[in-house]
Image (cartoon, coloured by chain):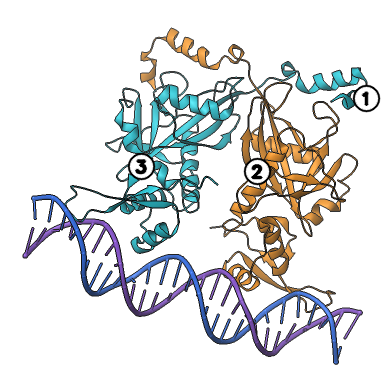
Chain colours: A cyan, B orange, C blue, D purple
Amino acid sequence: MKERSKTPETLDERAFLAEYDASHYPHPSVTTDVALVTVGAEHLRAVLIKRTRHPHLGEWGLPGGFVAMDQSLDEAANAVLTKKVGISGIFLEQLYTFGNPSRDPRTRVLTVAYYALVDEAKLMSDQRMNGGVTLAKLHVPWKGERGGPVRALDEQGNELPLAFDHAEILGMVVQRLRGKLDYAAIGFELLPRNFTLRRLQMIHETILGRPLNKDSFRRRMLASDLIVATGKHEADVGHRPAALYRFKRKRSG
Amino acid sequence: MKERSKTPETLDERAFLAEYDASHYPHPSVTTDVALVTVGAEHLRAVLIKRTRHPHLGEWGLPGGFVAMDQSLDEAANAVLTKKVGISGIFLEQLYTFGNPSRDPRTRVLTVAYYALVDEAKLMSDQRMNGGVTLAKLHVPWKGERGGPVRALDEQGNELPLAFDHAEILGMVVQRLRGKLDYAAIGFELLPRNFTLRRLQMIHETILGRPLNKDSFRRRMLASDLIVATGKHEADVGHRPAALYRFKRKRSG
DNA sequence: TGAATAGTGTCTATAAGACAATATCCC
DNA sequence: GGGATATTGTCTTATAGACACTATTCA
């Protein structure tokens, strides 16, 4: 540390201030928005909150909040989940940072977007979906990993207008999920602890938006070393009960 | 639109201000850092600039700069390339946003990291690598897509100490490149317009850090519909000259 | 001609898709 | 037993890796 003071003290200070004095520049506001995604029977779904303030009052937006000065981005995203949705301890990963200068009409607001994954049963178990909070169905108007905005629909299939650039953010979430599905263990984040291969396949099909070959899917999963048979089986299903599997957490070594 | 004004005007204004008045909160500084990467004979390489200011004076950092209030993040990253390295019109993509509160000892500084890819010949053609700017060799101490920081070395193999969290950023660049290589056309960004299959394979091998099967690589590339034979061949190579190929830009449809 | 790498052809192993047959549960 | 889905097994096809062989250039 001491070697650095070879440079004259005055220069050090001048240089230092030139870069760090925040008040020299106006700074953008920084928020984090979290797309909390789950997979229902037929659709990808995301938690949306009805805006009670301008701008985009009455439209639907992702849960979000400002990043505090002493908070890491991950902490800020976790805080959004806890405070706005009342859920924690789930898969959460940074997605992308959206910074178009005109994305918020008030002032310059960057948002560091995250996405979170959760089993639908866990999400619905508590009374989280009350007035102003909904679990919208996502309609993806493109195939494969092409990308682009998605639409949000309510139970009746009515369009829920999305605030800001949140349709883009949700679109990128779908794109990311489709891309990661093959090589990352994200399907399991959307299922309860024990699950059948059929349920897992349905998760994959819903994310990808296309049917998968059953034989091949089963073989790949069983060969993947990602899941273990629990020895248990379904019950009360009206047909031969399927074996229940569990996600094998990555080897501790 | 008129329905919204059911809410009293005063509430509108109060709500509006509560969210938008920037001065209510201190805001973090936001910079963008760009990892400009190329592939040399044996190594991945990245452009580094020697810091002439505190903190981390004398260490090496990625080219970077503040994001201006009227600039999109992409524009800010492009401006960094133009102003700090004197290059433009190359592949540039957002990587990740780093926001650990202690990553910069001065004040809270988020950085939206980008990575850019360029053909080594194009980079070296001009006199860009002068005092304080170097094209460091990257040493990746992990295999596959595990991730983690990488080290920067000069021509003699001496360690170039990296400032801030730039070793992590470069590590994530390598991770991203390895992940995208199979399904995205990024290899071509690192080559001149015309190239041989062998050169393309070397690019892939350098990025992945492992040898690839020649027959299989050639077959995959020729079947991929991503490249076209130009009809031309190498010259003056001391052995049978290889056919030159060109990247086929995505169909305009 | 020899060194060196490009390019072709063939064989084998592996994984995916298709399909048929059998198993097991609830009603 | 009948309905419904699980699970197993076999066959076919596509792709990757291995290897042998031929082709072409410069020195």
Q: Give above or below for A243 relative to B6.
A: below
Q: Amino acid at mark 2?
A: Gly
Which residue: 43% across, 60% down? A223
Upstream in sequence: badge 3 or badge 1: 1
Task: Return the residue at label 1.
Answer: A6
Which residue: 73% across, 61% down? B193
A6 or A145, nearer to the observer: A6
Q: Amino acid at mark 1?
A: Lys
C19 or D18, nearer to the observer: D18
Residue A125, image x and y in percent? 30, 31
Residue A122, image x and y in percent? 34, 34
The Cα–Cα distance between marks 3 and 1, rounded to whole angstroms, is 60 Å
Give yes or no for contact between labels 2 and 1 (Cβ–Cβ under 8 Å): no
Give yes or no for contact between labels 3 and 2 (Cβ–Cβ under 8 Å): no
Q: Which disc number belongs to residue B148?
A: 2
The Cα–Cα distance between marks 3 and 2, rounded to whole angstroms, is 30 Å
Q: Chain of mark 3?
A: A
Residue A162 placement, left or right of B208: left
Residue A213, image x and y in percent? 36, 62
Q: Chain of mark 1?
A: A
Q: Secondary structure at mark 2?
A: loop
Q: Secondary structure at mark 1?
A: helix
Which residue: 57% across, 34% down? A98
Q: Amino acid at mark 3?
A: Arg
